[in-house]
Image (tube, rainbow, N blue to C red):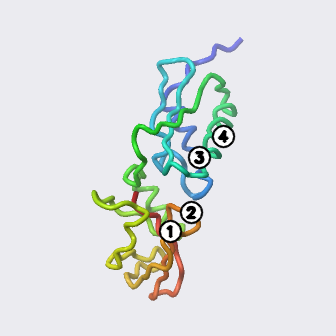
Amino acid sequence: MAVKQPISKATIWSWLEEVIDPEIPVLNVVEMGIVRDVVMDEDPIVIKITPTYSGCPAMNAIEMEIHKKMREKGVHSFKVVTDFKESWTTDWMTEEAKQKLKEYGIAPPEKTEEEGDFLTGLKNSQKIVPCPHCDSLETKLQSEFGSTACKSQYYCHGCEQPFEHFKCI
């Protein structure tokens, strides 16, 4: 009979890196900054997640995928807790995630600013978002909302391609 080895926190984090964001399939929930903590000092194990914004429709799918991944790895004593203590920010995204966004054709967010919010912050016509396809600065905001509320739609006059910009939150 094989003796079961305890699972390390690092192992669980690596498994969570296998959970892909359903809205941006090139990113996982760890590099997005959605998974905030794994608490191992209690039973069950607690996986804390923070939604990218309070109405994010992907959070239910993300939670279900975390459950699926943990059960797939043989862990059954765990719970996923949605934590609203801190508001998610694009500053929690890793630099690798931002590079992946650019390679996928979505302009990554810049560093957040202290004033304004992401829903109304784009009204400033001075904001220049570099094109993720050709790096041109000759871009124009087309719509404050793209395929999701956390993205806006731009057009590049350099390569004549539309693209989305992941808003700074």
Which SS class for mark 3? Answer: helix
Of labels 1 and 4, earlier in sequence is 4
**1 and 3 marks in contact (CB < 8 Å):** no
Q: Which residue is mark 3?
A: 59
Of labels 2 and 4, earlier in sequence is 4
Q: Which residue is mark 4?
A: 64
- Give me the residue at 59% from left, 46% from top: 59
Of labels 1 and 3, earlier in sequence is 3
Q: Amino acid at mark 3?
A: Met
Circle 3 or circle 4, nearest the eye: 3
Q: Point out the image quarter for the C terminus.
A: bottom left
**2 and 4 marks in contact (CB < 8 Å):** no
Residue 106 disc label: 1
Q: CA distance from mark 2 to mark 1?
A: 12 Å
Q: Amino acid at mark 2?
A: Thr
Of labels 3 and 4, earlier in sequence is 3
Q: Amino acid at mark 4?
A: Met
Q: Amino acid at mark 1?
A: Ile
Relative to 121, residue 114 above or below: above
Looking at the image, the residue that sits furthest to the left is 114
Which SS class for mark 2? Answer: loop
Which SS class for mark 4? Answer: helix
Q: CA distance from mark 1 to mark 4?
A: 26 Å
Q: Quadrant of residue 113?
A: bottom left
